[in-house]
Image: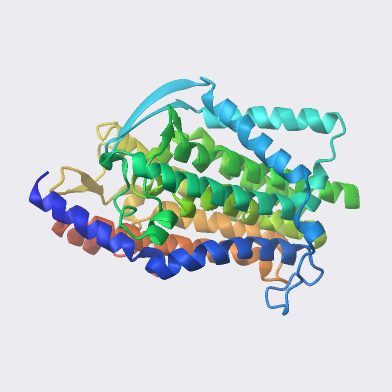
Amino acid sequence: MRPNNQALKHRLSHDTEREFGGTLGAICIPVFLPLTVLYLICMSRSPEASVLQWPPPLPSIDQLWDPLAPVLLLGWIALHALLYLMPLGKVDNVHQSGLHSVCFSPSGFHALCISGVMLMLLLGLGAPLGYLFELLLPLAVCAIAVSFLLSVYLYIRSFWAPPHALALGGNTGNPLYDFFIGRELNPRIGNFDLKYFCELRPGLIGWVVINLGMLMKEVELRGSPSLAMILVNSFQLLYVADALWNEEAVLTTMDIVHDGFGFMLVFGDLAWVPYTYSLQAAFLVMHPQTLSSLGAATIVALNGIGYYIFRKSNSQKNQFRRDPTHPSVARLETIATATGKRLLVSGWWGLVRHPNYLGDLLMALAWSLPCGFSNLLPYFYVIYFTVLLIHREARDERQCRAKYGLAWDTYCRRIPYRIFPYIY
């Protein structure tokens, strides 16, 4: 390895160790984030649904545990592990930053469709899908427990992984931080890629199932689903279906290429996503909202604009990465870098540095608006997601500046705004 590359890797590893608050963050985050998940679920079910309510309503042991919950959760994970191993769709061999992955794309989308058919059959047989509302807390507790157990397994097995399989920032020698951030980049059991599986399968599709359960609970309570509930379910189903239809794009994301697979990603995939992203639907069960036709049309338009920006910008970036000579991207203006890669400075990527984040945030706002303005709780997602994307953009900024040097400075002068045009 050339000395300049070695120095770059050392600097990136040192910078990574400071991310998420270093050792202090690695201690506090695995404690406070699981508590946050349980707190948000409890708040969404309380009559006031106030994030400022103190003391918060504490659930009883009976509310936290149901023997059906681990059976459902482990069965759900096993089902999607089986679907993951089935050769659905076309085979893609993807090489990215030294990572070789084989995926049956779009098998994630097929898994979503198969799950949908199974759910429709269960509903036709009279299965009480609305009971998921009562099971939310026990399921979340089990998902948190599975996240910790899987993270311990991943940390222990990483000591038998070859050095080239370790994540750049997850091999610091600090056991607390390495457990949190993940030592091994893409751990596998045979050909079963654990990170790739968790990233898009049980938690993401589980989010849609929980939403449907909340809709069915509303039907039980009120006879039919509200327009607000239908919008939330539809918007979020579109988002998940899009992610799974374009699942090969995840192989170029920071989560796959850069971050190790430790508690941070395991918990995020299996517990945080399904049980906090479904917060709007859970809120609407106990706090029904009435939408006017104009209000609903405005929210639909906002989600549509956000989705258009999100999909078009991501498709443009992915096409450029696959084939920069393709007619749709061949005329885009770029800046050359010393690494041989080129940075887009026109098209969607000439508007801001992360137009996909802008679309993501517009959609996040549209998901919360059907819940009205009387409570802050349904807006937790858009507030959290704004913080997350700003933090992720800052991480990306540091890595790109270290990687591209002067070319990155030129790029930043050319594209001064990061996410919001003329604002940030």
- Quadrant in which residue 103 is drawn: top left
Where in the figure is residue 255, as x and y percent of width and height? Answer: 41, 48
Where in the figure is residue 225, as x and y percent of width and height? Answer: 82, 48
Position of residue 265 in the picture relative to residue 32 (left or right): left
Query: Camera-side residue: 53 or 135?
Result: 135
Position of residue 30 in the picture relative to residue 129 (left or right): left
- Quadrant in which residue 315 is drawn: top left
Residue at the bottom extreme of this rendering: 54
Residue at figure coordinates x 75%, y 57% from the top left: 64
Question: How was this image coloured?
Answer: rainbow
Residue at figure coordinates x 52%, y 33% from the top left: 245
In this rendering, is residue 22 above or below 223? Answer: below
Quadrant of image for the C terminus: bottom left
- Quadrant in which residue 409 is drawn: bottom left
Position of residue 34 in the picture relative to residue 374 (left or right): left
Quadrant of image for the N terminus: top left
Query: Camera-side residue: 371 or 73?
Result: 73
Where in the figure is residue 385, as x and y percent of width and height? Answer: 52, 61
The answer to whether residue 109 of the structure is visible from this angle is: yes
Residue at figure coordinates x 72%, y 39% from the top left: 72
Where in the figure is residue 411, as x and y percent of width and height? Answer: 22, 58
